[in-house]
Image: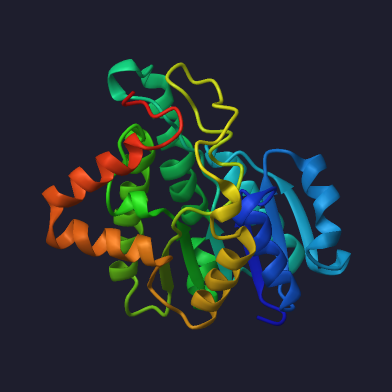
Amino acid sequence: MDGKVVIVTGASSGIGLATARVFGAKGAKVVLAARRLELLEQLAPSVAPSDRVLCVACDVTREEDCRALVEKTVARFGRIDVLVNNAGISMRAMFRDLDLKVLHSLMDVNFWGTVNCSKAALPYLLESKGSLVGVISIAGYSALPARSGYSASKYAVRGFLDTLRIEYLKDGLNVLVFAPGYTASNVRNAALTADGSPQGDTPLDEGKLMSAEACAEKLYKAVLHRRSQVTLTALGRLTVLFHRLFPRLTDRMTYSFIAREAGSPFQ
């Protein structure tokens, strides 16, 4: 990755920041994209030297922001080799209680954010025969209750990227669908509740989850080896397999698993 140009969205925390740091440590030129420019600039020295890092304020729900992100990247570094679509939000509420604006928000960030950035970067990725990455979730293979918008958006991202992989099969573009399992981050704290307000807490013991750094290392290796699909954690791989082979059993097991969460919506 020495000298390659990598854009990471949602780069201000969690998997996004850890991914940016891994690529930076490997010699890549890294573009950090998120809504809070000041925070990105504070984090930039931990990613790469100033001549190899660029911070861009970008709201991925805005098509014009995504175009500007790509334009600023090319103006500074001249090319794009990897786009990591990581920006995303979650939710936790039963559908019956949900304000539909929450579903719109989830689709706008998770799905349309990936579409907007991918559309803007695609000509440069085709030119470099680079990698287009979408960070989804096990919930993009096997749905999670009380996360209807989250699961729907991640399923949609997977379908979108799988389609692009086939469309550009003969053009040298690598398309990676990267599905972490439960990973320690602030995504659950920021998850939207029924009325759209942040949850503010996590129902999981974050210390027992895969670290964002370990997840980022696996993402880096997947890009390096031009993988098309990666599913992390033994539980995650088993869930995907069981969902395919025993869907009704998986539904019951998933229900039981979520019912045991702290503050479960089933209670």
Where, quadrant-wise, is the C terminus in this rendering? top left
- Vertical side of 179 occupied by 112: above or below: above
Quadrant assignment, res 198: top right
Q: Is residue 28 left or right of residue 165?
A: right
Residue that appears at 60% across and 59% down: 211
Residue that appears at 66% across and 70% down: 5
- Vertical side of 179 occupied by 60: above or below: above
Residue 78 appears anywhere in the view: no
x and y percent of residue 32 in the render?
A: 70, 55
Q: Is residue 113 left or right of residue 229?
A: right
Residue that appears at 28% across and 58% down: 239
- Vertical side of 168 occupied by 195: above or below: above
Residue 186 appears anywhere in the view: yes
x and y percent of residue 56 in the render?
A: 72, 48
x and y percent of residue 64 in the render?
A: 58, 40
x and y percent of residue 9 in the render?
A: 60, 52
Where, quadrant-wise, is the N terminus in this rendering? bottom right
Number of dots carrying numbers = 0
